[in-house]
């Protein structure tokens, strides 16, 4: 693996060269006093010193509303699958791991062509965290740094960015970079030091056990009182789902045109905390209580999804749910730690 | 197949929701292609006693309005309440918080006892007659109106959101008002508006009414966390939230 280097000015020119060539680049920009992923118009708006974005980059991998097919009422249907190339710039390690989990989930079993075809068009430039957000606990979840899964990984070493170009897609973008030099060993050491520090420093909430222990912890937690206690204040607003980089549940809806003969089938984000998430035909809701929905989310993260993807925990410690929850009950670490302390109660 | 006959009636309201239908602009031609509008005071002069779908705007505030809405109900197969006044009583319901005599004098002065100004407690339409569907909002969202009508024409049950505004607000990537220690009614109010007010840096005013199962206890309890009081919350609920269902 060779690491290369661009001065910050050169990196900006690299981004602007992609834009000038007509490449669609989505990057992190300021939104008032917070940050979000948005269409980039110029490198000047890019904020790679961000702490966390309000929504994760999943909105570009799994759009909030996405057409699946056009149909005729009582007739045929045609899939909608036109996905253009996209560069996703500035993805933090924890968010990258979340996208890689979704890649696995959408490609196993019933292969999801809409997701996968779009995903294949996306080149991910990940970046190491410069500034920890107020609720991050990625160190606890072992998601603070990554060594693979990206096309390019960039690290801010002060006056320059180091670039680790890992894939063909990554190399293809490097044609836009001018002034690329090999990183000196002192630079690479700086990068290692930053990553080593992040491995433990992104930890505003400390999980009281090894992350790999969580599935076993959940085995005896189903009837623990914590679910009811916390869920008493749950608004069932699904904010924790919406901002979660690993929540991928969706609803499918048909929209009919005014001719009442043609229409479009779309999928849109759904959330297991919403009251009617589990309502099925006949109006039966098999997760009617707030507590059962509250419990379900944390079981998904620590047990159900890990069982599908080789034990990886489906909480990457971004802390967005903690910030988003008006009632302040969503913090997964608080719940898991409580379960750790009271392992006999379940 | 003949087109369903639609009549639009207004009661106590500002007629702004009807105006939203007019504001469908080109789409209104699509609408009248698939339905036969037989009465609509705001847009045409014809009247009719025969219709399949009655769309009701406004709240019910006078004894003769109760009689009128009952007659309309007896003549239609489907009744749709249109807009906040019709679905939850709207801002008109603020009146119910005060002494009726005092309200009449405040509004009409020396004419307070003129017979045509005889007015009672404000009611949402469903508090007087059965309502089949509700299109919420102040004003309504015309896209939602259009999709409800199209669903009904296909014989399908329209889907109206039963989740809080937060869902749409988060989707818009707004910064939560509570992060600035400000009250927003979003967590207990029905979505469907696309979080229009929070997206314009306002709070949610609650015009779409409560979700089906609002956690008002949580709404009260979280006030403390943000340095606010339940009284602060009540004040914010006055505009649209007077005496509907569970209350803060």
Image (cartoon, coloured by chain):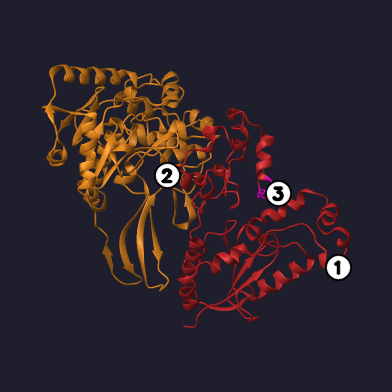
Chain colours: A orange, B red
Distance CA(mark 2)–CA(mark 3): 30 Å
Q: Which portion, as a residue range, is magenta? A: B238-245
Which residue bears the numbered disc 2?
Answer: A271
Q: Residues within 10 Å of mark 2 (few under 14, many from 20)?
A: many
Front label number (3 vs 1) = 1
The tag on residue B115 is 1
Asked whether the beta carbons under mark 3 and mark 1 sit within 8 Å of each other, the answer is no
Helix, strand or loop under label 3: loop
Residue B103 spot, x, y in % from top left: 82, 53
Q: Residues within 10 Å of mark 1 (few under 14, many from 20)?
A: few
Res A6 → quadrant: top left
Residue B209 spot, x, y in % from top left: 60, 51
Q: Given the image, what chain letter belongs to the residue carrying mark 3?
A: B
Task: Identify the mark nearer the N-term, 3 or 1.
Answer: 1
A206 to A279, vertically: above or below: above
Quarter of the image for the C terminus of chain A: give it.
Answer: top left
């Amino acid at each position: 693996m060779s690491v290369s280097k661009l001065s910050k000015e050169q990196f900006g020119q690299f981004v602007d060269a992609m834009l000038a060539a007509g490449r669609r680049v989505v990057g992190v920009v300021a939104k008032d006093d917070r940050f979000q992923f948005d269409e980039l118009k110029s490198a000047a708006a890019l904020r790679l010193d961000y702490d966390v974005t309000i929504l994760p980059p999943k909105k570009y991998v799994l759009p909030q509303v996405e057409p699946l097919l056009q149909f005729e009422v009582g007739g045929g249907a045609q899939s909608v699958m036109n996905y253009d190339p996209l560069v996703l710039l500035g993805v933090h390690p924890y968010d990258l791991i979340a996208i890689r989990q979704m890649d696995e989930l959408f490609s196993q079993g019933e292969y999801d062509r809409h997701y996968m075809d779009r995903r294949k068009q996306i080149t991910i430039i990940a970046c190491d965290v410069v500034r920890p957000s107020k609720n991050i606990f990625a160190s606890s979840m072992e998601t603070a740094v990554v060594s693979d899964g990206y096309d390019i990984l960039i690290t801010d070493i002060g006056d320059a960015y180091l670039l680790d170009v890992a894939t063909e897609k990554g190399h293809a973008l490097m044609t836009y970079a001018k002034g690329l030099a090999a990183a000196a060993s002192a630079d690479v050491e700086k990068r290692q030091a930053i990553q080593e520090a992040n491995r433990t420093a992104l930890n505003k909430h400390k999980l009281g056990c090894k992350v790999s222990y969580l599935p076993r912890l959940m085995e005896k937690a189903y009837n623990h009182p914590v679910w009811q206690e916390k869920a008493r204040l749950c608004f069932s607003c699904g904010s924790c789902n919406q901002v979660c980089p690993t929540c991928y549940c969706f609803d499918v809806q048909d929209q009919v045109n005014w001719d009442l003969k043609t229409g479009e089938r779309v999928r849109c984000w759904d959330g297991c905390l919403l009251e009617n998430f589990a309502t099925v035909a006949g109006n039966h809701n098999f997760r009617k209580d707030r507590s059962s929905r509250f419990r379900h989310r944390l079981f998904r993260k620590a047990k159900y999804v890990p069982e599908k993807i080789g034990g990886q925990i489906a909480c990457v410690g971004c802390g967005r749910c903690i910030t988003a929850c008006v009632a302040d009950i969503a913090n997964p670490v608080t719940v898991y730690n409580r379960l750790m302390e009271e392992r006999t109660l379940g | 197949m003949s087109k369903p006959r639609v009549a639009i009636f207004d009661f106590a309201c500002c007629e702004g929701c009807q105006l939203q239908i007019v504001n469908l602009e080109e789409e209104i031609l699509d609408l009248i292609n698939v339905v036969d509008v037989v009465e609509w005071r705001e847009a045409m002069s014809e009247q009719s006693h025969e219709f399949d779908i009655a769309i009701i705007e406004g709240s019910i505030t006078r004894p003769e309005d109760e009689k009128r809405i009952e007659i309309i109900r007896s003549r239609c197969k489907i009744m749709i309440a249109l807009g906040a006044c019709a679905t939850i009583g709207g801002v008109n319901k603020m009146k119910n918080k005060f002494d009726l005599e005092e309200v009449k004098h405040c509004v009409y002065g020396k004419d307070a006892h003129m017979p045509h100004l005889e007015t009672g407690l404000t009611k949402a339409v469903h508090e007087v007659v059965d309502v089949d569907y509700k299109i919420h909002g102040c004003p309504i969202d015309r896209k939602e109106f259009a999709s409800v009508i199209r669903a009904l024409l296909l014989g399908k049950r329209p889907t109206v959101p039963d989740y809080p505004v937060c869902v749409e607000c988060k989707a818009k990537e707004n910064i939560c008002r509570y992060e600035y220690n400000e009250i927003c009614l979003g967590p207990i109010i029905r979505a469907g508006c696309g979080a229009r007010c929070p997206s314009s840096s306002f709070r949610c005013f609650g015009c779409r009414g409560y979700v089906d199962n609002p956690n008002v206890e949580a709404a009260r309890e979280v006030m403390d966390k943000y340095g606010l009081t339940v009284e602060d919350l009540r004040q914010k609920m006055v505009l649209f939230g007077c005496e509907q269902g569970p209350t803060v």
